[in-house]
Image (tube, helix red, strand yellow):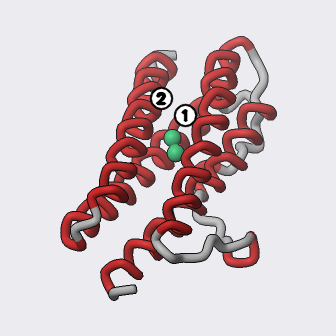
Amino acid sequence: MSDLNARIVEELTCSYFMELETVMNYIANSTNLVGVKAEPIKQSLLADVAEEIGHAQTIAKRIHVLGGSVPGSGAFQSAQHSLQPPSDPCDVLSVIRGVIEAEAGACAQYKKIIALCSEANDPVTEDMCVTLLADEEEHKRDFEGFLVEYERG
Ligand SMILES: [Fe+2]
Ligand SMILES: [Fe+2]
């Protein structure tokens, strides 16, 4: 494996864990939030859980194809501080902001891999990351829409 390919596998592994951490935090927040205002957010997060699991599986398969090894939970390090469930179960706003930050982080990470892929001439991984990036941009846009409404009170 060339240095560049090894870096791609490393960054894909980072994305893989980001996706799985998102799954944990979306499940927690979609369960913990209460109240009438929380309901659409809970539904949206639940729908995203399935999508983010799919992303993690897609990335895992690609890591394998590239000759890498998919790590277990021992290598996992938590990074999504802003997505931790709020102490107030009615604090929908902090969850919305946390989701936007997590989705923006995922977008930035996919853009980083896309740039590496064009350098390494790896159009298949690049294509995969472009598709994942499109999904994350959509998630981010959905929650930015929620934010506009919730900030109005
Ligand atoms: Fe994702
Ligand atoms: Fe997402």
Would residue 139 appear left or right of 73 to someone viewing this image?
A: left
Image location (x, y in percent) of residue 102: 50, 49
Residue 43 disc label: none
Task: Determine whether 124 is above or below 90 in the image.
Answer: below
Residue highlighted by disc 2: 143
Q: Does the residue tagged 1 have its C-beta within 8 Å of any atom of ligand 2?
A: no
Residue at 58% over, 36% down = 51
Image location (x, y in percent) of residue 6: 41, 81
Residue at 53% over, 76% down = 68
Q: Please identify the quadrant where the N terminus is shown.
A: bottom left
Q: Does the residue tagged 2 have its C-beta within 8 Å of any atom of ligand 2?
A: no
In terms of secondary structure, where does tag 2 sit?
helix
Would residue 138 appear left or right of 82 to someone viewing this image?
A: left
Residue highlighted by disc 1: 96
Image location (x, y in percent) of residue 150: 51, 20
Residue at 32% over, 49% down = 127
